Image (cartoon, coloured by chain):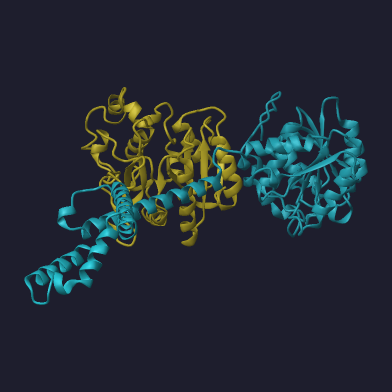
Chain colours: A cyan, B yellow
Amino acid sequence: MNRPASASLPRILTIDRVYEPVAEYLAAGDRIGDGPAATPTSPLDLYLVHLLVEFAGRSVVAADLAAGSTLGASTVALLANPRVRRVFVEQGRWPSPPDGARLHETVARFVEAREPERAGTLRTAADVAAAIDALAAAIAPGEAAVAIVSASEFRDEGGSSATAFLERFPEGTVVVLGVGRPGVDRAVEGILREVRDGDGLEVRFLRDASSSLFEATAAVLARGATADERARRVGELFATNYDFLAILRDSCLYAVERGSRAADEAEAGRIAAATPARFASKIDFEDATHAHRALREENERLARELREARSWVRKGNPLLAPARRVVAFGRRHRDWIAPAGSLRERAARRAIRVGGRLRGG
Amino acid sequence: MLRSDVCIAVPTWNHEFFLPRALRSGLDALRRVRDSGGTGELLVVDDGSRDGTEALLRSLEALYGGQGLRVVRHEVNRGLAAARNTALREARARYVVFMDADNHLIPENLPTFLRAIRETGAAAVYGNLLMRRLGEESAFWACSNESFQSRMHEENYIDAFALFDRDQIADCGGYQLGCDAWADWELWLHLAASGRRLVFVPLVFGVYQHMDNSMMRVAAAGETPHARFRRVFDQFGFRSLAPARTRHERYFPGLGYL
């Protein structure tokens, strides 16, 4: 099943490799009773158990207090890891398969057939307290203690097994399987209540460690910074240079930019097609936009100057007042300056018409 | 223990950049297979990658394991032929597609190739491959678009990107170790010489990514295996005249042999 565990480097296998023995075990469904497991174990959750065991230390002694609810799947996963020297399971609450064999016997038979050198790794105890006592007696200096519990314990019994384990093994790690969503699963509130009331207890829900783990139902419970450190290491394993949401965002922005550029090019093509031949030389669309803006500003400047010139002509011209006085004198005395029908009168009328045109009338 | 109809095997070594595209096409192809009543899996064999592929595959396996994605890893790099043989060993299906990580499938067409290999009983069926350069959206060429002929002894024009009968390949010893760049050519010649049938289906199988620094191109710049293959398969120069169970075989489901 596995090579002997080497000294210190954790064996980071693939999910498929870790789950392979469990898949084989579960495929023999007729030997482990009817109906689904009370605590379903996905390949991802059992992979997280594998990682947490790998991070726990060189040698691990484990108590699988969720064996009955997982139909032995969690036990097989633990036994498949050569870093685990001994696994204790509780005898009492396992369902009896159709052939009458006890579940722990079925698991032991499966593991020993698959890997004979692992014979004797699985031990039984009468109940949870006895399993914890047996683990305490078996653990050697330098070995790590790990327990697996089901989330259902936190819904019903307030997590007594987990807290008893951590009281006995202050540096131990508890993996909780089958934790649902906050607001939906009462186990979440149960776990948080234990942490709040506990002495230095911390919990980390592994679905929060990485976006790739959003379907995980495993949580790690421990004292001090252990839970945080283990969850962080798990999260780092699933961190990649590929932030999928960022890739999606960048892809959308790139598509929008390409579409916008294509639309600009299409518009430039339409303008070029509609432009008279004398303007048909190829002009860059951006240059044309700049030229258009410059022409508009020049036009506004000239219009402003024209308005100012007209205003100056109408109001402030120093020649205007004398010219008006001359015209008024001429009108008062036109009978003798330019009698009706005379040549002088006709010339004067022509001059007035021309003056009117010059003023823009 | 066979559980699926088809296994899409993706051997990869430091191809992190291309993997998502290849795996996406594989998962889409599996969906098409399921829609046509079959089952499938997508098996990635990581040949000891060190470029970030391992972490990427871990995330993808967590996300897509339920859709049939499996990952197997070599702790050390063992070569392309060894990776393909691992895929042959680990595949849980009768039929195996070998897809390099820089290529991708045309998902809609895989069911047709599956039907072709079942109906012909061939050791392998293959189709056209559109060749595309990096960054371009259109193919510039097509390869693997002829039936198996004696000319294969002179030049390899059929890529390994094809659908194989795992049992027949395994019975013939799988891929030859030690000639990674030419392992697929060697396998084609070995299968043909062993009396196995290699059938061309005139349909696009996938897209082949043309790379300037691919293993094939780097190998082609050095020693070529022609002399060695001649000694192995055609030492006396009579191969083109000898009887061969597979020659010019073209088949399309629903139409028959063409």
Comparing B78 with A327, the one in front is: A327
Q: Residue A319 location, x and y as percent?
A: 27, 55
Above or below, A167 against A353 in this view is: above
Identify the residue shown where x is 15% and y is 56%: A277
Q: Residue A11 location, x and y as percent?
A: 66, 31
**Could one spot residue A207 in this view of the protein?**
yes
Comparing A99 with A299, the one in front is: A299
Q: Residue furthest front?
A: A336
Quadrant location, the C terminus of chain B:
bottom left
Q: Is residue B102 left or right of residue A61?
A: left
Above or below, B154 against A68 in this view is: above
Identify the residue shown where x is 48% and y is 41%: B19
**Could one spot residue A80 in this view of the protein?**
no
Q: Is residue B89 left or right of residue B225?
A: right
Q: Residue furthest left?
A: A343
Number of labelled discs?
0
Q: Is residue A254 left or right of residue A331?
A: right
Identify the residue shown where x is 38% and y is 43%: B161
Above or below, A122 against B78 in this view is: below
Q: Residue A53 location, x and y as percent?
A: 74, 35
Q: Is residue A321 left or right of residue A134?
A: left
Q: Residue A168 location, x and y as percent?
A: 91, 36
Q: Quadrant of residue B111?
A: bottom left
Identify the residue shown where x is 69% and y is 47%: A207
Above or below, A117 against A347 in this view is: above
Comparing B238 with B229, the one in front is: B229
Comparing A274 with B1, the one in front is: A274
